[in-house]
Every structure is written in structure tokens, then in C-alpha cells.
Image (cartoon, rainbow, N blue to C red):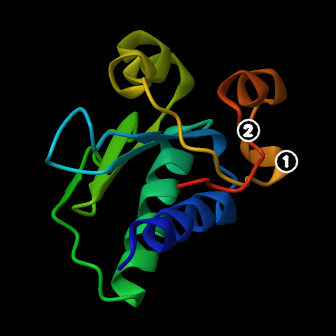
Amino acid sequence: MEIQKLQRLVIDALEDVKAQDIKVFNTSEITSLFDRVVIASGTSNRQTRSLASSVADAARKHNIPILAYEGEDTGEWVLVDLGDIVVHCMQPAIRQYYNLEEIWGGKPVRVKLLPQSTIPAAAESYGFGEQDAE
């Protein structure tokens, strides 16, 4: 599946379960292992599990292989590896502690998000809200 379509599928799946502060980063120049990192927050263990489950269900529905699905036991940080995109569903405290945005955040991708999917100040600083230009 084309990367923009896969990216949209992931974002839609996250937004369906009310993910917060969704960030998408282009990692194609940093690593050859995957092209995008998507980071999203959930307010509880149950919600982070639901976020990851929604992404996995959407992938299965479109016959996209899931290479790894980790962290569901605790629900603090659940990772879904779809090959070209790695999705991190995290609770805010865990997200702040590990600060993956610093590692992968060199090249944010502009995507259209629902208003409740992002924190407005953070979204503006990353240039979100416009259609993906890539």
C-alpha cells in the first residue's frame, strides 16, 4: 500500500478511538527500516490498548501484515509495527519520559487531523493541519 494511504489508514484508526496529540514523522532519511513513525497518546492503559487494537484491526481489514505488536500486557506503551509505519500508542507520562519526538522528530509530516486528535499549540508548532505535502 502507498505510504500516504497507509499513513491515513493509521491516523483514521487512531482518531476513531479518540487518540490525542497525534504526531507523524518521516524517518526515511534516518533509517531504512521504516518510512514513518506515528506517536499518539491515550489517557489510560485501556485507551492505549484500544488505540493499538484499532490500528491492528484496520491493518488486518486491508491485509496489511503486522510485524510486531508489543506492550499490550501493561498498556502504558503499545507498539504496532506495520513495516513501513511504526505506531507508538503511549500514556502521556511515558511519552514525556521517553521523548520519541526528539529521536524521530527531525522531519514532521503534515497531515489533516480531527480537532480532538491534537493539542492546538503543539499542532501549530509542528505545522499540522494541512494536507500531507509528500
The relative height of residue 122 versus residue 71 in the rendered view (above or below) is above
Query: What amino acid type is highlighted by mark number 2?
Result: Thr
The residue where tag 2 is placed is 118
Secondary structure of residue under mark 1: helix
The relative height of residue 31 versus residue 84 in the rendered view (above or below) is above
Q: Position of residue 71 (x, y in %)?
A: 27, 44
Residue at 34% in and 83% down: 60
The residue where tag 1 is placed is 115
Residue at 18% in and 38% down: 31
Q: Position of residue 11 (x, y in %)?
A: 57, 59
Of 134 and 52, nearer the camera is 134
Q: Position of residue 40 (x, y in %)?
A: 54, 41
Q: Is residue 79 left or right of residue 128?
A: left
The answer to whether mark 1 and mark 2 are in CB contact below 8 A is yes
Residue at 81% in and 21% down: 121
Query: What amino acid type is highlighted by mark number 1?
Result: Pro
Quarter of image, res 6: bottom left
Q: Which residue is the extreme one toward the front?
A: 134
Of 4 and 86, nearer the camera is 4
The relative height of residue 52 versus residue 21 in the rendered view (above or below) is below
